[in-house]
Every structure is written in structure tokens, then in C-alpha cells.
């Protein structure tokens, strides 16, 4: 992993940043109040984890449905930004990355994005809480499975 970064980068960020080179507890990290944004491939689980924790997203889709999810996050929900890739180089430049980070953290647009994701977080919290639609739907599934298991036990006896 270190080979992807400029020489000396890891030494320069040692006191002010954290680079996790392996698997990380994503939900735990996203729920921390110091997280100001999330660079995401826009897979559905990561998308939901960011939204339910109220974290704005820098959309970096790779393939499949991730591109569609990125469009939804940016154009419909207003909780993400996406980099412009320099066609001639096929890469995202450092100025572009800086601009995206500023857009979701400090620029004028950041207030809008942060308010939108906070609103969605509140909606998700209600939906997942007792009495919410997702909670109720999962409860119905659990009850049906419980009945099926009981029926299977009776029939097996």
C-alpha cells in the first residue's frame, strides 16, 4: 500500500492522519463524530452506512451498479460529489481531490450537502427504529420464519 503514495507521505501524516492499510471497521469509523466525509466506491452497503451515519460522500464508483448509485447520491439525494477525471491522464489530480474535500466540508455547498445527509440520517433512524417501516418489515419476516421453523419441527416429530 505504501508504494502508492509519494515518498515521505506516510511520515508527513503520521501525527495528523491515519492510514489503514487493511480491513477496517467501516461502520465504527463512519459513526465517529470527527469523520467529515467518506470516499466511497458507492456499493449499496457503503452507501447506506454513510447515510445512516450522516456522512457526506465523495463518489468514486468502480463498476456495475456503483455508477448508478453515484448518480442517485449526487443528482437525486444531493449528498455526494464526484471527481472530474482528466481524460488525457486517466487520473484524478490532487487539486480535484482537494476541491471535492472542500466541497463536502467547508465550502458554501458543504452546508447544503451536510444538511441533506443529516436529514436522510434522521429519516433512516426513524425507519430502523421500533415502529419504523424497515423495523416492521423485518419483524414480519422474522415472525414468518419463526412460524415456518415451528411447523417444520412439528412435522419432523
Image: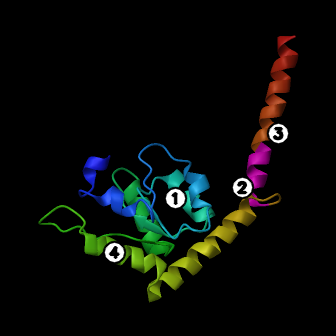
Mark earlier in primary sequence (2, 4): 4
Alpha carbon separation for disc pair 2 and 1? 17 Å
Residue 88 is situated, as x and y percent measured from the top left of the image, at 11, 66
Give the foreground label among 1 and 3: 1
Q: Nearer the viewer, residue 105 or 81?
A: 105
Q: Are marks 2 and 1 in contact (CB under 8 Å)?
A: no
Foreground residue among 59 and 149: 59
Of the two numbered discs 4 and 1 on the same chain, state the one appearing first in sequence. Answer: 1
For the residues labelled 4 and 1, the Cα–Cα distance comes to 22 Å
Q: Is residue 29 above or below residue 141?
A: below
The residue drawn where x is 41% and y is 46% is 21
Q: Quadrant of the C terminus?
A: top right
Kind of element beneath mark 1: helix
Magenta stretch mostly in which secondary structure? helix
Q: Residue at x 79, y 46 (%)?
A: 139
Can you give x and y, in whole percent of width and height, for residue 118 in the image?
62, 74
Q: Residues within 10 Å of mark 2 (few under 14, many from 20)?
A: some
Mark 1–mark 3 contact, CB under 8 Å? no
| Label annotation for residue 134 | 2
Residue beneath disc 1: 47
Residue 56 placement (x, y as % from top left): 51, 70
Residue at 57 percent across and 60 percent down: it is 30
SS for callout 2? helix
As helix, strand or loop, the secondary structure at mark 4 comes to helix
x, y percent for residue 26:
54, 52
Query: Which picture quadrant has residue 86?
Result: bottom left
**Cβ–Cβ below 8 Å for labels 4 and 1?**
no
Label 4 sits on residue: 98
Q: Where are the magenta residues, as a range?
A: 132-140
Label 3: which residue?
143
Q: CA–CA distance between discs 2 and 3?
A: 14 Å
Q: Earlier in the sequence, mark 2 or mark 1?
A: 1
Amino acid at each position: 500500500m505504501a508504494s502508492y503514495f509519494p515518498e515521505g507521505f506516510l511520515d508527513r501524516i503520521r501525527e495528523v492522519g491515519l492510514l489503514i492499510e487493511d480491513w477496517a471497521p467501516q461502520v465504527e469509523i463512519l459513526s465517529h463524530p470527527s469523520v467529515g466525509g467518506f470516499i466511497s466506491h458507492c456499493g449499496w452497503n457503503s452507501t447506506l452506512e454513510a447515510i445512516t451515519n450522516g456522512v457526506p460522500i465523495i463518489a468514486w464508483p468502480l463498476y456495475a451498479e456503483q455508477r448508478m448509485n453515484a448518480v442517485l447520491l449526487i443528482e437525486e439525494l444531493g449528498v455526494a460529489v464526484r471527481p472530474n477525471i482528466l481524460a488525457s491522464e486517466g487520473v484524478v489530480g490532487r487539486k480535484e481531490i482537494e476541491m471535492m474535500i472542500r466541497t463536502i466540508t467547508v465550502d458554501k455547498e458543504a452546508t447544503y450537502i451536510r444538511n441533506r445527509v443529516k436529514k436522510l440520517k434522521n429519516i433512516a433512524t426513524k425507519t430502523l427504529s421500533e415502529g419504523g417501516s424497515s423495523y416492521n418489515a423485518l419483524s414480519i419476516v422474522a415472525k414468518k420464519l419463526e412460524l415456518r421453523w415451528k411447523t417444520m419441527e412439528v412435522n419432523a416429530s
